[in-house]
Image (cartoon, rainbow, N blue to C red):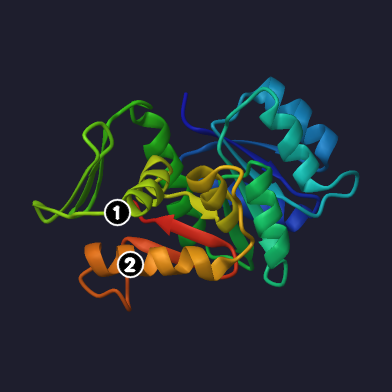
């Protein structure tokens, strides 16, 4: 049996478009039209990935995420409207793994899906993360770019570790702050941006046009899975 994807959207045209596109890509699909049905189908269908529209008729999409996260870590990619920047952040903080902004192209969606397929086929406790010429050795706390070790400050390393442990996944500003500084959370995006810029100067060929640590505008950052 192939990769199973649950499509959750109340718009018939979107569900049809996604099901056709996914089946052409070789994926098995199931669908739900509201939040309660999504939770039920997640239990019965046991999907490998869930595509979840946030604007459901019976409940907020974030509530669906919260309920599924009580018993499952299945990757959840939320589908959001372009103006819903806060909704993206809230959904990611609630436990979603990524988002795709409507309207979206099939190739973008398929690329996001492939990232999570690669992630789920990896050994979870693998100590070495490789992204192109960038290598993060989580066991030895070493960072290499093109075979050369890069020296990081303790805080820079902690940020890099969080990104590497979630390679390909969007990490919000709040998630980064909480993971690195614990309860000492400051709601100041400039604070984390300073450290990200320092990291880019050390690992990127061109810090102005980074290829590893990518900014998700107004949301957070993503370590690209090259």
Q: Is residue 223 left or right of residue 46?
A: left
C-beta proximity under 8 Å, tags 1 and 2 = yes
Helix, strand or loop at disc 1? loop
Category of crowding for the residue at label 1, using alpha-carbon neighbours closer than 10 angstroms: few (below 14), some (14–19), many (at least 20): few
Q: Which mark is residue 198?
A: 2
Nearest the viewer among 171 and 21 is 171
Give the residue drawn at x 64%, y 41%. 95
Horizontal and vertical percent position of residue 30: 66, 35
| Residue drawn at 31 percent across, 62 percent down | 199
Distance of label 1 from label 2 (alpha carbons): 10 Å
Mark 1 or 2: the one toward you: 1
Q: How many marks?
A: 2
Label for residue 208?
none
Q: Which residue is mark 1?
A: 153
Query: Residue 124 lies in what quarter of the image?
Result: top left
Residue 99 % position (x, y): 59, 55
Q: Mark 1 or mark 2, which has the lower sequence index? A: 1
Question: Where, by quadrant of the figure, is residue 40 drawn?
Answer: top right
> Where does residue 60 sit, x and y in percent of width and height?
83, 47
**Residue found at x 75% / y 52%:** 54
Q: In the rendered image, which quarter is residue 48 located in? A: top right
Name the residue at the bottom extreme.
208
As rendered, which of 107 and 136 lies closer to the eye?
136
Locate residue 211 relative to residue 190 in the image: left or right: left
Say if residue 211 shows up in the picture: no
CA neighbours of label 2 inside 10 A, class few (<14), some (14 to 19), many (20+)? some
Residue 185 placement (x, y as % from top left): 61, 52
- Left or right: 152 with respect to 189? left
Apparent side of residue 120 relative to residue 54 in the rendered image (left or right): left
The reply to whether residue 107 is visible in this rendering is yes
* Residue at the limit of the structure toward the front, as seen here: 184
């Amino acid at each position: 049996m192939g990769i199973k994807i649950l499509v959750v959207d109340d718009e018939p045209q979107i569900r049809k478009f996604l099901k056709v596109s996914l089946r052409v890509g070789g994926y098995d699909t199931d669908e739900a039209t509201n939040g309660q049905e999504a939770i039920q189908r997640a239990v019965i269908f046991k999907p490998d990935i869930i595509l979840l529209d946030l604007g459901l008729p019976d409940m907020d999409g974030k509530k669906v995420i919260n309920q599924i996260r009580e018993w499952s870590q299945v990757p959840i990619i939320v589908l959001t409207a372009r103006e819903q920047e806060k909704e993206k952040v809230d959904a990611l903080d609630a436990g979603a793994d990524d988002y795709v902004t409507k309207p979206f192209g099939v190739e973008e969606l398929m690329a996001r899906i492939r990232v999570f397929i690669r992630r789920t086929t990896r050994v979870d406790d693998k100590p070495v993360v490789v992204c192109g010429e960038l290598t993060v050795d989580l066991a030895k706390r070493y960072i290499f770019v093109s075979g050369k070790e890069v020296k990081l400050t303790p805080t820079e390393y902690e940020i890099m570790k969080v990104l590497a442990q979630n390679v390909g996944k969007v990490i919000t500003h709040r998630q980064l702050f909480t993971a690195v500084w614990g309860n000492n959370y400051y709601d100041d995006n400039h604070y984390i941006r300073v450290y990200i810029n320092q990291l880019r100067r050390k690992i990127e060929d061109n810090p102005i046009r980074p290829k590893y640590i990518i900014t998700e505008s107004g949301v957070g950052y993503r370590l690209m899975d090259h």
